[in-house]
Amino acid sequence: MGELAKRIAYEALLVAAAFAIGLVAVVAVAVYFKAPVTGMLEALLTSWATLPDMVAEYTAVLALTAAAFSIPLYAGLFNIGAEGSLYAGALVALWTALETGSLPLSLLAGIGAGISVSLLAGGLRVYLGVNEVLSTIMLNWILYWVLLYTVIVYLVDPTTPQRTLQVPVSARLPTIRGIPSTIIVSAAVMIALFIYVRMTRQGLLLRFSGANEEASRERGVNTRFYRLISMVIAGLLAGLAGAIHVLGYSYSIDVLGGTVRNYGFNGIGVALMGRNDPLGILAASFIFSTLLAGSQLVEPLYNVPKEGADLAIGIIVIALAAPEAFRIIYRYMKGWK
């Protein structure tokens, strides 16, 4: 059996084991709340048919935020700042849309905002040695409170004070033959990322600089440059995620930030589920999004609290993500010796 066949068989075994563990969790939750097991499983696994727009939107945004974590990881950086870059992208895209009514300008503004935030963290890491985990945690919180302040003070809809003014129709992403543009944009970006990372010289050098920084430098690779580029790409992806979410799905931001919250953090789990490969991440995003949307159905259908369904989903995600998480931890521990 070739190496590729062995890897496929190994990953298939891990996925089967993860879903077996998840099945046990779903059964336990269903029994505890006296719900039909088959009905609960159907709600969780087939939400792509009952809630297609929600699944498509979750998939689109989570794929981009997951990639915003995985691309810097290739370069040896642990970026958890996709959350903050997404806040910036969503807020600036919304504000631009309200001011100009232009879809292209709003998308570009959101992307630019995301890049600015990520570039700040990347610059602090590359030029000043500031740990990117610390800087991105602080930036996430700063941008969260900036988002809430701006939404409440400047953008709130006086007729519906629980949310902002809505994106004008002229600045909204269209639906193309019944398919949301958000998922089309996201899928195209993930394919482009796969080509960049796996099939280009620049992608090879980016991965090489993260796999062995010392060897890269000895061979003339500018590791600082590739680390900075990885953070620029991460900011672009997260800023785009925030922009397409607001311009193509929610059309507003609620005053508690719940409309845009946690996509960046959930993206880390999705990246690990997808083994940090762009196409794997796209598939993992669909699986995770289907489960998330399905958790919205179990309460009205079977009187199972959403938190109960989320518990089962969390166990599935942990089981799927754990092998990659352990691999990354092992690699970093080897580097510390």
Image (spheres, helix red, strand yellow):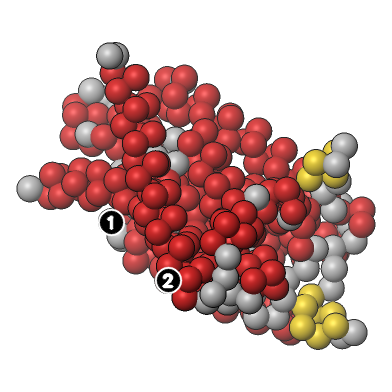
The amino acid on which the numbered mark 2 sits, given as a three-letter code, is: Met
- Which mark is on residue 129? 1
| Badge 1 element | loop
Judging depth in this view, the residue of 192 and 103 nearest the camera is 192
Q: What is the crowding at mark 1: few (fewer than 14 residues within 10 Å), some, or many (at least 20)?
A: few
Q: Which x, y percent locates residue 136? A: 42, 63
Query: Horizontally, is 244 left or right of 231 in the view?
Result: right
Residue 288 appears in the picture as rendered? yes
Q: According to the image, label 2 marks what residue?
A: 138
Q: Residue at x 85, y 68 (%)?
A: 166
| Disc 2 from disc 1: Cα separation | 16 Å
Which circle's residue, 2 or 1, is located before the other in the chain? 1
The amino acid on which the numbered mark 1 sits, given as a three-letter code, is: Gly
Q: Residue at x 59, y 45 (%)?
A: 286
Q: Residue at x 90, y 84 (%)?
A: 159
Judging depth in this view, the residue of 101 and 219 nearest the camera is 101
- Write down the quadrant of residue 294 in the picture: bottom right
Question: Comparing marks 2 and 1, which lies closer to the viewer?
Answer: 2
Residue 65 appears in the picture as rendered? no
Q: Which x, y percent locates residue 88? A: 62, 63
